Every structure is written in structure tokens, then in C-alpha cells.
């Protein structure tokens, strides 16, 4: 029966709702599918209802504490009986930014003032409380994303609730941190907690503010990596001002399982490349806007399916680096990624990559460029790539673009 529900769920979630009313057995099985990704499936006009339901899972003591903090803002969370099902334990994917966004909708609905009257501190306090609840009760969470929208504060102090609830989300499969704040003391605590209780994370992604990285943070990242049993995918961004040797060395623990590495906006030297060459199962390597490879020399052959080499240095040096890497690994590659400005890479591709099927062109944008200008520029450049491709080969190669925001 669950397989049937899963098939219907994958096709259209809305088709599952009538099944709730068939009988108790159907209801019990269907509700888990409706609540495994509630933030992604909830319509915008029902966001406040989702938060209203989640708030019922606080204990009486927690509700009293929250109301005491919100009393000054004339906000009262009413005490309601718990729902029939423990929905919070069914959730499998949590994004911190989703929590903040949905809490905004909830406060907009229950307060009499306009949206601008809602202070960040109210949003943060309720969001923090819900985040703590999920880490405490959400033993089925598989994907956890820390991507704060309000960057004026750090995450909540993890020790507040982990001391009395040490087990936490032990089924975590993917952890992504895209965190632009420079206040990271509690993030470091959080990583220590995660590395202690979660041993089977297979996908790790870290992107902090470029000024937030420190030796302590990098060591926390390294410890999180080494504590996992079978890490498959790893991504790191924005470390141009500090070395990443400790992180790269920790990847060697997963020499037989890592299949995908993405590195962006950092210093990547020959030693780091030598470490990557030891990853026997590596199939996808993405190097975006990195420095330090001016003297790169290929030693062994990668057996890659996907390779992105985007904005590694100046135009001349990028051509030399690209040619050096593709010369040794080009035969196996089916997808390539390049900076859209370096059309000369197309000649190298056709020389060394006979099996390439797709080329992704990256355009580095910034806040000063409006969307119309960016679209016009990228369309003009893509046209040049396609014209050049058609003049060089009859092979069908797909070309598409990705716009990347410039690192400030």
C-alpha cells in the first residue's frame, strides 16, 4: 500500500488528500507522505496554518516560556491539544530559511499591524524555538539546510537543548550550510553536535561568508567529514582568505566513496589537486572561480564524467590549465563547464573530449548589472559559442548557461 501511495505522491501530492478520509489505515499511511516535505508542498496562502499546527507540538512549559517572551509584542500563542499524529516527527527535510519565511506569514496573519511592524526579533525567536523542536523531535530528518534569511543573529545555542535530548536527527543524509553571517560561534557548536550524533551523512555542502572562516571553523568542517562512514558528495565555497589543507586532507578518509567534489571561490594549489587525484571513485569535479592553479601539472588520469573549470586564472593561463587537465582526463567526460567568455576552450574540448554531450557556460554577474543587461549579454555570447561549434563539428552538443553571483 505504501508503494502505491508513494507512486501517487511522486505524481501529484494533491491526489493524496482524499485518501485521508477513506479509513483509519489509509489515513495513517497517507499522512506520512503529506508531511515528509511540508514546507515545499504547502501553498503560500496556507503557510501560516502550517506554523499554527507546528506550534501545538510545544509542551505547556515551552508555550508558557514563548508567550512570556512575546508578551511585550502583544502576541499570544494559544495552548491547543496536540494533533492526532505527531507531524513534526514525520518531516524529512528542513530549511532554516523556510522556517523564517513561514513564521513571517504566521505573524502577519495573527498581528493587527502591517507587515513592516513585525520585528525581526519576533520572527527569530519563534523560528529558533521551532528549529530546536525539530532537532529534538525530528528523528526522521534526512535533509537539513541552514540558510538564514535574517543575518543579524547567530543560530541558537545548540547546548540549550542537546544536553537533555542528545540523540537528535541521527538519520541525516544531507547537510547544507549556506550561511552569510559572520557570527558563527553557535554554528561551530552545531557542527560538533552533528559530527557526534550523525555518522551516515552522504552529502556535505559548506558555504560561509568569506570573512567568517577561521582555523576553528575549518577544523570543525574537517571533523564533520572524518566522522562520516560513507561520504559521497562534498562542496566548499568562499575560502579565498585562508588555506584549506586540513579540509582536503580529511577527504582522504573517504577515498573509496567520494564521487563528487565542488570547490568555488577558494585558493586551490597543486597539493590540493594531488589529494583529489587519490579519490579513486571521483566522477564529478567542479572547480569554480578558484585561484592558485597557475603551476598545475597533471600527474595521473582522472576518470570523470563531469568536469567544470570556470575562471581559474587569466584567459591565457586558464587555457593552459584547461588543456593540461583535459589532455589527461578528457576521454571519459560527458559534461563540461566553462566561463562563457573563454570561447577558445571549445577548440580544446573538441580535441580532447570526443564523448562530450553537454557544455555549461558560466556567467559571473554582480548586483550592479540589471537582469535585462545580463540576459542580453549571455544570449549574445551563447550565440557565438553555437556558431563556433557548428563551424567546427557536426556533433550534437547541448549548450546552456548558468549565472553566478560575484563574490564580494
Image: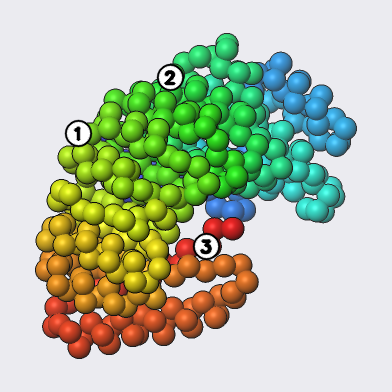
Where 353 sits versus 153, above or below?
below
**Residue in the foreground of this view, choosing between 150 and 236:** 236
Local SS, label 3? strand
Query: Does residue 139 appear to the left or right of 61 in the view shown?
Result: left
Query: Does residue 256 appear to the left or right of 76 in the view shown?
Result: left
Query: Does residue 65 appear to the left or right of 198 in the view shown?
Result: right
Q: Earlier in the sequence, mark 2 or mark 1?
A: 2
Local SS, label 1? loop
Asked whether residue 362 is in view, the answer is no
Numbered circle sitting on residue 256: 1
**Residue in the foreground of this view, choosing between 332 and 312:** 312
Where 31 sits versus 392, above or below?
above
**Residue in the foreground of this view, choosing between 282 and 135:** 282
The mark lying in front, picked from 3 and 2, is 3
**Residue in the foreground of this view, choosing between 129 and 166:** 166
| CA distance separating discs 1 and 3 | 33 Å
Badge 1: how crowded within 10 Å, few (<14), some, or many (20+)?
some
- The residue that label 3 is drawn on is 405
- The residue that label 2 is drawn on is 197
Q: Residue at x 81, y 35 (%)?
A: 75
Amino acid at each position: 500500500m505504501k508503494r502505491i501511495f508513494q507512486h501517487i505522491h511522486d505524481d501529484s501530492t494533491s491526489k493524496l488528500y482524499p485518501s485521508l478520509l477513506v479509513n483509519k489505515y489509509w489515513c495513517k499511511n497517507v499522512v506520512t507522505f503529506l508531511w515528509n516535505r511540508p514546507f515545499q508542498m504547502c501553498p503560500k496562502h496556507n503557510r501560516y496554518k502550517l506554523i499554527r499546527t507546528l506550534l501545538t507540538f510545544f509542551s505547556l512549559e515551552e508555550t508558557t516560556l514563548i508567550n512570556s517572551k512575546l508578551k511585550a509584542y502583544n502576541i499570544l500563542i494559544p495552548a491547543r491539544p496536540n494533533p492526532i499524529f505527531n507531524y513534526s516527527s514525520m518531516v524529512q527535510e528542513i530549511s532554516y530559511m523556510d522556517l523564517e519565511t513561514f513564521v513571517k506569514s504566521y505573524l502577519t496573519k495573527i498581528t493587527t499591524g502591517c507587515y513592516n511592524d513585525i520585528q525581526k526579533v519576533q520572527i527569530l525567536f519563534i523560528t529558533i524555538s521551532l528549529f530546536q523542536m525539530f532537532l529534538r523531535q525530528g528523528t526522521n530528518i534526512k535533509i537539513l539546510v541552514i540558510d538564514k534569511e535574517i543575518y543579524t543573529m547567530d543560530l541558537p545555542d545548540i547546548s540549550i537543548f542537546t544536553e537533555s535530548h542528545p540523540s537528535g536527527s541521527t538519520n541525516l543524509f544531507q547537510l547544507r550550510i549556506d550561511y552569510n553571517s559572520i557570527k558563527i560561534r553557535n554554528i561551530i557548536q552545531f557542527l560538533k553536535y552533528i559530527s557526534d550524533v550523525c555518522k551516515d551523512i552522504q552529502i556535505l555542502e559548506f558555504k560561509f561568508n568569506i570573512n567568517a572562516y577561521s582555523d576553528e571553523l575549518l577544523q570543525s568542517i574537517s571533523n564533520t567529514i572524518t566522522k562520516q562512514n560513507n561520504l559521497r558528495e562534498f562542496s566548499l565555497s568562499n575560502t579565498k582568505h585562508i588555506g584549506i589543507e586540513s579540509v582536503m586532507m580529511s577527504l582522504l578518509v573517504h577515498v573509496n566513496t567520494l564521487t563528487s567534489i565542488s570547490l568555488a571561490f577558494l585558493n586551490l594549489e597543486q597539493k590540493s589537486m594531488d589529494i583529489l587525484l587519490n579519490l579513486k571513485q571521483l566522477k564529478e569535479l567542479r572547480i569554480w572561480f578558484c585561484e592558485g592553479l597557475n603551476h598545475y601539472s597533471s600527474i595521473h588520469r582522472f576518470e570523470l564524467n563531469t568536469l567544470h573549470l570556470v575562471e581559474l586564472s587569466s584567459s591565457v593561463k586558464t587555457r593552459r590549465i584547461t588543456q593540461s587537465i583535459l589532455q589527461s582526463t578528457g576521454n571519459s567526460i560527458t559534461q563540461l563547464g566553462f566561463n562563457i567568455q573563454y570561447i577558445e576552450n571549445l577548440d580544446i574540448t573538441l580535441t580532447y573530449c570526443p564523448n562530450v554531450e553537454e557544455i555549461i557556460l558560466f556567467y559571473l554577474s554582480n548586483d550592479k548589472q540589471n537582469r535585462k543587461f545580463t540576459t542580453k549579454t549571455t544570449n549574445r555570447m551563447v550565440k557565438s559559442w553555437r556558431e563556433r561549434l557548428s563551424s567546427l563539428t557536426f556533433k550534437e552538443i547541448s549548450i546552456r548557461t548558468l549565472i553566478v553571483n560575484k563574490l564580494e
